[in-house]
Image: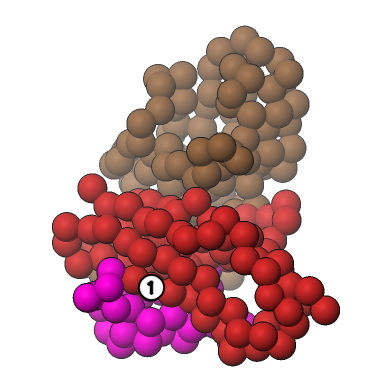
Amino acid sequence: KAGVTQTPRYLIKTRGQQVTLSCSPISGHRSVSWYQQTPGQGLQFLFEYFSETQRNKGNFPGRFSGRQFSNSRSEMNVSTLELGDSALYLCASSSGLAGAPDTQYFGPGTRLTVL
Amino acid sequence: AQSVTQLGSHVSVSEGALVLLRCNYSSSVPPYLFWYVQYPNQGLQLLLKYTSAATLVKGINGFEAEFKKSETSFHLTKPSAHMSDAAEYFCAVSVAAGYSTLTFGKGTMLLVSP
């Protein structure tokens, strides 16, 4: 099976702009989670989508949003970019099914730089 | 709420030496525990996971970890380090079956010298 793919791999934006990142999960996986990785804060959970519904959300401002499509592909959007949003954004997919420990498989990430 | 503590932001070993990366967790309910590895400019790769079956878990690339409930630990070991093991290692916990949100430790960078 193909792994998790993320596009684009690298992005450079300026403060105040908005950005959209895309994630395609492993075939058959219905859950997609997003994480932000920075040197200072480490890996932090942003949100999880399952069957087109946000199922869980981390502690991030409303400028961070996401959605999931019927084919399980997901996008996250960051509006009004700030310098502190510079990070590696990782997408992870899993089956999302209840009743069993669920393993997340990660994509290569999108490196966002805000100038 | 659950949390993970990884002792040591950097660990240095010589090639062929034992690798020991420490992870302690805090959870009010039985946890699921994971170790991931991250190579430069890449995503996270799953090394191994504990899901309440055997307490000694074997993973890829010769790594293993032992779940010790009394010590709330899940340390990662490898008998003999290889240069290719140099990377950053993350311990993570989740607590709700089917809700796979992970809480990560801060990571440990493993440095391997010849």
**Image coords of residue B79 (percent x, y):** 59, 89
Q: State the residue in front, B17 or B46.
A: B17
Which chain does the brown colour mark? Answer: A
Give the image quarter of residue B95.
bottom left
Q: Chain of mark 1?
A: B
Q: Residue at x 50, y 45 (%)?
A: A43
**Image coords of residue A115 (percent x, y):** 73, 18
Q: Is residue A49 magenta?
A: no
Q: State the residue in front, B17 or A13.
A: B17
Chain B palette colour: red
Asked if one can make out residue B69 in the rendered structure from this viewpoint, the answer is: yes
Q: Quadrant of the C terminus of chain B?
A: bottom right
**Image coords of residue A24 (percent x, y):** 56, 49
In the image, B50: left or right of B58?
Answer: left
Q: Residue at x 53, y 60 (%)?
A: B8
Q: Residue furthest left?
A: B28
**Image coords of residue B69 (percent x, y):** 24, 75
In the image, A20: left or right of A71?
Answer: right
Q: State the residue in front, A71 or A111.
A: A111
In the image, B104: left or right of A85?
Answer: left
Vertical relation: B19 (above or below) A61: below
Residue denoted by label 1: B74
Q: Residue at x 69, y 22 (%)?
A: A114
Asked if one can make out residue A29 in the rendered structure from this viewpoint, the answer is: no
Q: Secondary structure at mark 1?
A: strand
Q: Residue furthest right?
A: B114
Give the image quarter of residue A29.
bottom left
Label 1 Cα crowd, 10 Å radius (few <14 / some 14-19 / many 20+): many
Q: Amino acid at mark 1?
A: Phe
Vertical relation: B56 (above or below) A54: below
Q: Is residue B63 magenta?
A: yes
What is the magenta range?
A: B46-72
